[in-house]
Amino acid sequence: MKIVTIEEEAWQQLNSRINGIADYLKSLDDTSYDDLWLNNHEVCQYLHLSEKTLWRMRTKGEITYSKIYGQYFYTIGAIKEMLNANAIQSSDEYVEELMAKGKSYIEKGRKLKSTNQ
């Protein structure tokens, strides 16, 4: 086993670069879930809303959605924007729960469609 020694200043520079890279990677991970699509039922379940309330929000233009063959879909990013705009009363725990559920869907094999492809 070899022991390598470096000056303290060099170590601090290296450590700050590693931390910078780690922070950058964490920021990429957090935003990747904004493109995950959830259906009407999932949004209602996680935000503790009725389908009628979600319908009212759609008709008032309070939330961005897509309609495909009669089903409504929402991105996590659109839901975050709506919550941040105080469209409904909510707490951070709902957003955390939504993020956790989104991550679990991805881990189970649901794929994100990249807009870059």
Image: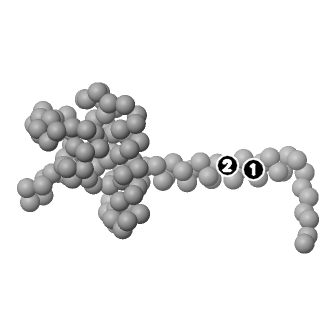
**Residue pictured at 19% horizontal, 34% vertical:** 62
Query: How many numbered discs, if any?
Result: 2
Depicted 111 relative to depicted 82: above or below:
below
Q: Is residue 16 left or right of residue 70?
A: right
Q: Which mark is residue 19?
A: 2
Image quadrant containing the N terminus:
bottom right
Q: Position of residue 53 (x, y in %)?
A: 15, 35
Q: Position of residue 82 (x, y in %)?
A: 28, 35
Q: Nearer the viewer, residue 71 or 16?
A: 71
For the question of whether residue 17 can be seen, the reply is yes
Q: Which mark is residue 51?
A: none
Question: Which residue corresponds to mark 1?
Answer: 15
Q: Nearer the viewer, residue 56 or 15?
A: 56
**Image quadrant where residue 103 sits:** bottom left
**Residue pictured at 14% horizontal, 42% vertical:** 51
Q: Nearer the viewer, residue 87 or 43?
A: 43
**Image quadrant where residue 25 sits:** bottom right
Give the class, few, some or many, for how many residues have Cα within 10 Å of label 2's Cα (few <14, many ≥20). few
Q: Secondary structure at mark 2?
A: helix
Q: Secondary structure at mark 1?
A: helix
The image's colour scheme reads: one colour
Depicted 18 relative to depicted 58: above or below:
below
Residue type at mark 1 is Asn
Residue type at mark 2 is Asn
**Residue pictured at 41% horizontal, 63% vertical:** 107
Query: Mark 1 and 2 residues: CB-CB less than 8 Å, in contact?
Result: yes
Q: Residue furthest bottom?
A: 1
Q: Position of residue 42 (x, y in %)?
A: 24, 50
For the question of whether residue 58 can be seen, the reply is no
